[in-house]
Image (cartoon, rainbow, N blue to C red):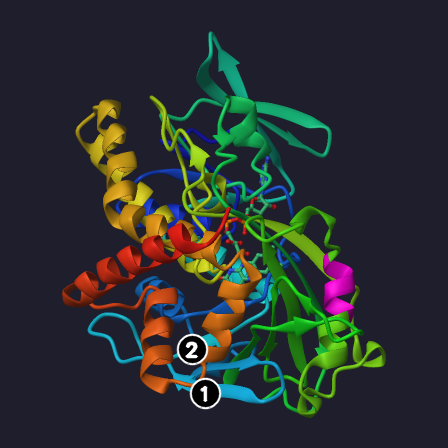
């Protein structure tokens, strides 16, 4: 039996990052993962410069064959409007991104945490042991064996379903946006493209606009990750079937990708995107939530990997300080840090996704925006959270502009 100061539940990006940074600071850490690596994870596999930065900080080897470097984003609206934008220059973040199957990425990042001294226990499912409403331990179940660990602190990194978190009493704010997305793998002659591509205006077989967006992310190995997504702020979003949307998108995507039902290598798989820090409370007396378990996905673009690494690292910082001072009361600072770091940006995002829930606003933004390169360069910076600190005031202006726009829309 292991006696660790910290137990991390889940070895996705958030859990592995938390374990990496805690183990690196000399704490004893056990990470519990219910699956066995390599394991599949439903994702677009897209890594923006913020993800690359965090991976680089953990010493990730980008020379591995499974990593495909990406220099920018290509966006389409309909057949006629297209723009290609390079990732912006930034004082902290690199000007490149990547695509890598989560099947390969997550196990490699978990290994980085192990190299720092974290213990990884796979094929083991964790559930909370509650006593008088307080987290008193972590029950483990593996191959019919049961065990209970009693760490000082638990980092909850169990993803968007977050059964562990829910059993402790966390809940998602229903007034915050949520995303639904599905992805599948296809063979493609353009798999070595160095741009990720997004389609802002998907049409069904009748040519009618569908509320949502599509993507093709090239993997550099003869295959591409193709997906569609939509938000709970979109009209009738509950009645929309993402598999139907996917079929419509495969049908209408640019010919050069060579997409067709015959080129499909897997059935589409769907998942939920908890966003804008919608799950709380963010921390308790001896636990913290990170990644999708705290709903950390960026609503501007549906990106969650970077925010899983970032919140994992931020939580590790606070857990380290609490353990070093032998004062778990210091964990209370973590929620404030989350709010200071992402609060304003995610508030703007909530207004933005509410605005694009109105088809006329989405259409106008896509069709007017894509005609202006300077505007789109700025939009890319805002959406991928790559504004420089001194450009923050521009973000605040956008926030006010969006707020005015939302008020003007009827209903
Ligand atoms: C269709 C789709 C496409 C997406 N595309 C992108 C994209 O292109 N780029 C991007 O940045 N983000 C994307 N996202 C979001 C991204 O996948 C998530 O934000 C990210 O995986 C969050 O990481 P995490 O570590 O918090 O959770 P997860 O990656 O879900 O990891 C949680 C881990 O915990 C384990 N676990 C769960 N419960 C237990 C338990 N009780 N005991 C032990 N282990 C447990 C799971 O097996 C899993 O390994 C997409 C999401 C979806 C659904």
User: How crowded is the residue under tag 2: few (<14 C-alpha within 10 Å), some, or many (20+)?
Assistant: some
User: Where does residue 323 sit, x and y in percent of width and height?
Assistant: 25, 31
Q: In the image, which residues are magenta?
A: 242-247
In the image, 268 versus 208, the foreground residue is: 208
Question: 27 or 248, which lies in front?
Answer: 248
Q: In the image shown, does 279 or 191 lie closer to the viewer?
A: 279
The answer to if 256 sits in the magenta stretch is: no
Q: Residue 229: image x %, image y %?
A: 61, 61
Q: Could you say which quadrant of the image residue 242 lies in? A: bottom right
The location of residue 406, given as percent across then percent down, is: 41, 53
Disc 1 is placed on an element classified as strand
Q: Is residue 89 above or below residue 289?
A: below
Magenta stretch: includes residue 245: yes
Total numbered circles: 2
Which residue is tagged 2?
A: 369
Going 45% across and 39% down the picture, which residue do you hit?
Answer: 278
The answer to whether residue 115 shows anywhere in this view is no
Task: Note whether 85 is above or below 111 in the view shown.
Answer: below
* Residue 231 horizontal/vertical position (percent): 57, 53
Look at 51% across and 69% down and name the residue there: 46
Q: Is residue 57 left or right of residue 103?
A: left
Q: CA distance from mark 1 to mark 2?
A: 13 Å
Q: Bin the neighbour count of mark 1 within 10 Å (Cα to Cα): few under 14, some 14-19, many 20 and up.
A: some
Judged by its main secondary structure, the magenta piece is helix
User: Residue 84 bears which disc, if any?
Assistant: 1
Pick the residue in front: 399 or 186: 399
In the rendered structure, the answer to whether residue 309 lies left or right of residue 323 reads right
Rendered view: 35 above or below 201? above
In primary-sequence order, the first of circles 1 and 2 is 1
């Amino acid at each position: 039996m292991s006696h660790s100061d910290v137990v991390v539940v889940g070895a996705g990006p958030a859990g592995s990052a938390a374990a990496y940074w805690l183990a690196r600071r000399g704490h004893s850490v056990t990470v519990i993962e219910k699956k066995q690596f390599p394991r599949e994870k439903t994702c677009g596999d897209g890594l923006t410069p913020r993800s690359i930065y965090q991976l680089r900080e953990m010493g990730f080897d980008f020379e591995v064959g499974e990593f495909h470097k990406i220099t920018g984003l290509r966006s389409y609206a309909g057949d006629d409007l297209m723009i290609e934008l390079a990732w912006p220059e930034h004082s902290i973040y690199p000007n490149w991104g990547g695509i890598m199957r989560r099947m390969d990425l997550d196990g490699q990042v978990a290994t980085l945490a192990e190299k720092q001294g974290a213990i990884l226990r796979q094929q083991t499912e964790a559930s909370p042991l509650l006593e008088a409403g307080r987290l008193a331990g972590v029950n483990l179940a593996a191959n019919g064996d049961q065990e209970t660990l009693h760490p000082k602190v638990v980092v909850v990194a169990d993803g968007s379903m977050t059964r562990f978190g829910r059993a402790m009493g966390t809940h998602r704010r229903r007034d915050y946006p949520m995303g639904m997305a599905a992805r599948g793998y296809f063979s493609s002659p353009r798999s070595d493209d160095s741009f990720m591509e997004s389609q802002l205006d998907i049409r069904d077989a009748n040519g009618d606009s569908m509320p949502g967006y599509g993507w093709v992310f090239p993997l550099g190995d003869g295959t591409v990750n193709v997906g569609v997504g939509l938000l709970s702020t979109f009209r009738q979003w509950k009645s929309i079937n993402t598999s139907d949307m996917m079929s419509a998108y495969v049908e209408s995507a640019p010919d050069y990708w060579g997409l067709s039902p015959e080129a499909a290598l897997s059935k589409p798989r769907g998942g939920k995107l908890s966003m804008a820090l919608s799950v709380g409370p963010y921390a308790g007396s001896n636990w913290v939530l990170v990644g999708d378990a705290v709903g950390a996905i960026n609503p501007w673009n549906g990106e969650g990997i970077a925010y899983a690494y970032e919140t994992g690292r931020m939580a590790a910082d606070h857990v380290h300080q609490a353990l070093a001072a032998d004062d778990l009361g210091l964990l209370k600072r973590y929620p404030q840090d989350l709010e200071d770091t992402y609060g304003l940006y995610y508030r703007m995002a909530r207004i933005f996704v509410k605005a694009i829930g109105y088809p006329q606003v989405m259409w106008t933004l896509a069709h007017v925006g894509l005609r202006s390169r300077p505007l789109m360069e700025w939009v890319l910076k805002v959406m991928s959270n790559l504004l420089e600190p001194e450009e923050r005031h521009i973000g605040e202006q956008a926030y006010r502009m969006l707020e005015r726009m939302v008020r003007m829309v009827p209903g």
